[in-house]
Image (spheres, rainbow, N blue to C red):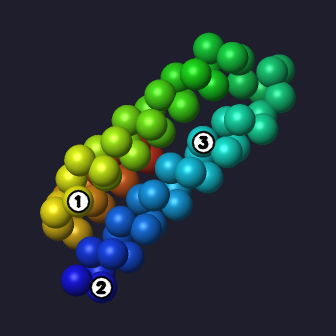
Amino acid sequence: MREKVAARNNLEGYVYSVKQAADSAPEEKLSSSDKSKVKQSCDSVIQWLDNNTLAEKDEIEHKLKEVQSD
């Protein structure tokens, strides 16, 4: 159970840090269109977490790898 919570927190923390980095990136580094895509992707992962509260550690870690490769 503890590992599942840690995996969930890891994914959530990663997503929020990416979203924050996109928000604070200057226009010349990240266009508003790209910022929007990043935010949508992050929101999608957060929604996945909300909808999959019973997801196992392996599923959560797989989702993290999936997000990191995007």
Which residue lies under the disc numbered 2? 2
Looking at the picture, tell me which residue is in the foreground, 8 or 50.
50
Q: Earlier in the sequence, mark 1 or mark 3?
A: 3
What separation in Å lies between label 3 and label 2 (alpha carbons)? 26 Å
Quarter residue 45 falls in: top left
Point out residue 67 in the picture as x, y percentages from the top left corner: 40, 44
Type of the residue with mark 1:
Thr
Q: Earlier in the sequence, mark 1 or mark 2?
A: 2
Q: Residue at x 33, y 75 (%)?
A: 5
Type of the residue with mark 2:
Arg
Point out residue 11 in the picture as x, y percentages from the top left corner: 42, 59
In which quadrant is the C terminus drawn? Answer: top left
Which residue lies under the disc numbered 1? 53
Cβ–Cβ below 8 Å for labels 1 and 2? no
Provide the secondary structure element on which disc 2 rests: helix
Which residue lies under the disc numbered 3? 19
Q: 63 left or right of 52?
A: right
Q: Is residue 66 above or below residue 7?
A: above
Provide the secondary structure element on which disc 3 rests: helix
Residue 64 visible to an observer of this rendering: yes
Q: Residues within 10 Å of mark 1 (few under 14, many from 20)?
A: few
